[in-house]
Amino acid sequence: MEIPPRLVGRDDEIRTLRALVTAARNRAGGALVVRGEPGIGKTSLLHAATARLPGVRVIRVDGYEAESAIAFAALHRLVVPLRAYEEALPAAQLAALRTATGSAEGPPPDRFLVGLGLLGLLDVAAGDQPIVCAVDDAHWLDPESLEVLAFVARRLQAESLAIILAARDDDAVGARTAGVPVLQLEGLDRNAALALLTASVPQTLDPLAAAAIVAATGGNPLALVDLSRDLDAAELAAIGLADDPVPIGRTLESHYVHQVRRSGEESQRWMLVAAAGSSADTEVVLRAARALGIPASAADGAEAAGLVVLGSTVRFRHPLVRSAAYTSASGAERRRVHAALSSAAAELGLTELEAVHAAKATLGTDPAVADRLEQAADRAGERGGFASRASVLTRAVELTPAGPDRVRRQVAAAEAALAAGAAHVAYELLAGIDRSALDPVLSGRVIAVETALAIFVPEGTRIVHASELMLRAAELFHGRDLEREQLALVRAFEYAMPPERLMEGVTLDELGRRLTAGSELSEGTVSTVLRGLGAHILLPYADAVPLMRRAVDALASIDDADALQLGTISVALTTALWDAPARHAHLVRCAAAARERGSLHVLDTVLWILSLVEVNGGSPRRSGEYVEHVRELRRAIGYDAENVVNVAYLAWQGAPREQVEAIAEGAGALGFGGVQASAASGLAARALAEGAYAEAYALLKPLVDDPYLQVTPLQYPDFVEAAVRSGRPADAAPFVALLAASADANGSPWNRGVSERSRALVAANDDAEVHYRAAISALDGAGVDLEIARAHLLYGEWLRRSRRRREAREHLATAAEAFEQMDASAFAARARAELDAAGGSVRTSAPGQAVHLTAQESTVARLAASGRTNAEIGATLFISPNTVDYHLRKVFQKLAITSRRQLADRLDALRYGQSIASSPAHSRRSVSADSGLPAR
């Protein structure tokens, strides 16, 4: 295509954007962030790339400063032309999208569910015609709209859709669009800049001066064009040959100030109104101008001067023109204009815009305006706009006189910033609070925010005090806010889990007593849960079991909203009860609730927990799949890997011991004692598999000597095996007794199975077999694949040493095949070696028939085989139905099938010996101080 004169030197950039559009035409969706300094040509490039696209629907959405604090304002403008496609969306996505854009009422939606709704809406609309969504001035978008667009941009794979975001170099934009490819615009190269300058200057310009001007402007196209239009050759030469560098931003703005003032007094006043009222609603500007007595012809004068472009919206030639029009006026003039804009917005029913302009019209404090801003912030929160709520409340604080209302708004703003994930904003807000003005409830709320920040953004060893701090918050809520008090107590227990033995400031017994006392304050689910947790800590195990069971049953009946608040607490209770099916059911239910509501941060935590519990009796393969789900989910959010590495899984997968220990040590330095214990447990299991029994004993002995709640009993069976096989059977005996006693109390088949397996290891040779058989019988169907495979392995080894080779081969083959299936490579190698010694072999597939699916293909295949529709799979994986279809077609090709009916059979046929797993991509990152570790 012919490149417009203003785009001299941008051939490569236009080709890049055109390639993006061409790919979208061919159902290969993609996105790009075009970044650069003011005047570098982002807008011109965006228009050139989206001009003359036959057969493509271009949807343009611009950012406006006046709307940057109105939650989902830009999203509303984006979805308006697509309303006809809304009914094709799943109900939850449609409700979230409508609530966010203010077209329906409902509970505040998670912004990621809104993002999934937008992805689905654009995907459906693009089925009729490829879509290019072009967003200019993205740095002025409200944060919620920008995050939603970035979410969609990161999820594009097989859609007829391209998203192009043009923005200034801005840290906030960079953070919100992380993970989206960037096209960084720099100044024009020397030859292109000289060509543009020469074409723009009517007189002949000295070549030396021209080269100096190019160097001084850094090849900024707007600087070259606009300065050359109003300065003669001599003035340009003076700029170019000056000794000092040219501050192009200030030079251009001064240049535009001169142009604004030269346009005439009325046009200057009209441009001030337009600059102050920057929004998509031109009617607000027109009404305010009329109220100020500015004639309509003033707009024509501004347009004739080449400073604005009038249409359905008012667009300034450049942001620096708008800045010049605004800053050239006095403060009193600007406040008068904002007052007029506020009145105009009120007349049009734009209450949030009214409050924003009223705030800008106010000098000093004004309680009435602060009240209006707080109401606007509440409306933003009702639509799920927590970032906007925090921003608007912060301005409300500035307008509020010192006193209770000011402090209350500061605390609410900090809570909103935390909910939006803006930790640095929350820290700044908390730092500005006058602690002496806080009442007890507000003090408790401040502590809760500070503690959550310590959990998610660890600083030093603050996480080790998190449980203590939440107990302090609960005490402040006591007798004043029952609901907050009980939830603070639940958090106090949750926050005790990451540090485990490193917890400081409170003992487990003190925590247990406080939980129990809190449970007596009322009746209900939370009270039942607190009672169960208190019993878990304080009571003898047999006495605690009924109370823990009641708590688990209570959690099974909560609704989705409560599942997001309380769901993960079930892990401690179900693990303490050795109830693997209930543990899995609770976590899966919590994950489903998080998906349904788009709460990706909760889903991230739940999937990570699932990856962790799978290495405790489940399946390393499933653990790895959950790890990959976490990574994929975090890529959707905008991160490149999980926050906390599952070190136990790394150990199971054969990562070097030094690496596992280094990650654990780094986590321990931040207070995450649970990661250290998990690393030791994983390394011990691998040592057992490799026959390094003394090493396993050394790793586990410190843990079992200092047991921690529900965590350590799971390590007893490994310690028994390590102690017996390393020649220390007396050390094993007490733990065999503990396992038997807990199995008697809880009735768990899992607990009974590992108890019998442990008894077999310490039993006399003639008595061992009955216990091995009892172990296998109990573990069959208990939902702990790894445990039953290990029972078959140990029994097979015992049979071989008892010279019962035929029977040994049967159990060893069962173990070897199970270990292979679950990717427990070290145990698989041990089982194969034992089977070989017994004269047997493992069943394998025919050569060349291995099938390798990516992690996402594997997940899509399993979900499709279970009967899920494309829409349901898309909602589960946060991708569009078209992308699901794309992956399924690739799966069908790899598996040589043609329909979903064949999928389940084909997957079953490949259970043994063939690989249907994700490509190996284990994280090698260690935990760092700025990694934002979640409460895990």
Image: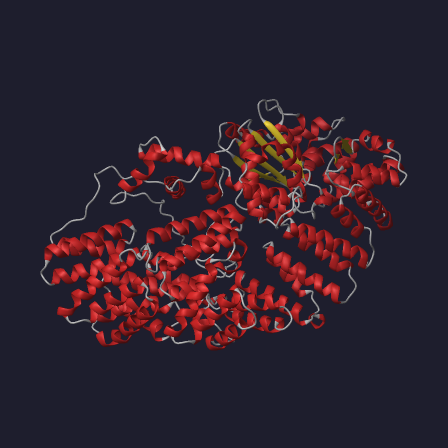
Residue 555 lies, with reference to residue 68, above or below; the image says below
Rendering quarter of residue 540 = bottom left
The residue shown at (56%, 26%) is: 129
Name the outermost residue toward the left: 803
Please state if 867 lies on the left or on the right of 797 as rendered. Answer: right
Residue 862 lies, with reference to residue 840, above or below; the image says above
Residue 711 lies, with reference to residue 380, above or below; the image says below
Please state if 150 lies on the left or on the right of 804 as rendered. Answer: right
How many labels, in total? 0
Q: In this orientation, which residue lies closer to the viewer: 758 or 359?
A: 758
The residue shown at (44%, 62%) is: 553
Quadrant where the N terminus sits is: top right
- The location of residue 825, given as percent across then percent down, is 27, 53
Residue 438 lies, with reference to residue 911, above or below; the image says below
Judge whether residue 241 can be spotted in this image.
Answer: no
Rendering quarter of residue 89 = top right
- The location of residue 725, given as percent across then percent down, is 21, 68
Q: In this orientation, which residue lies closer to the viewer: 707 or 737?
A: 737
Rendering quarter of residue 306 = top right
The residue shown at (70%, 28%) is: 198
Please state if 278 lies on the left or on the right of 553 as rendered. Answer: right
- Check the image and tell me how it is coloured: secondary structure
- The location of residue 662, given as percent across then percent down, is 40, 62
Judge whether residue 594 can be spotted in this image.
Answer: yes
Q: In this orientation, which residue lies closer to the viewer: 855 or 522?
A: 522
Name the outermost residue toward the right: 293
- The location of residue 720, given as percent across then percent down, is 26, 70
Q: In this orientation, which residue lies closer to the viewer: 659 or 902?
A: 902
Please state if 385 lies on the left or on the right of 611 as rendered. Answer: right
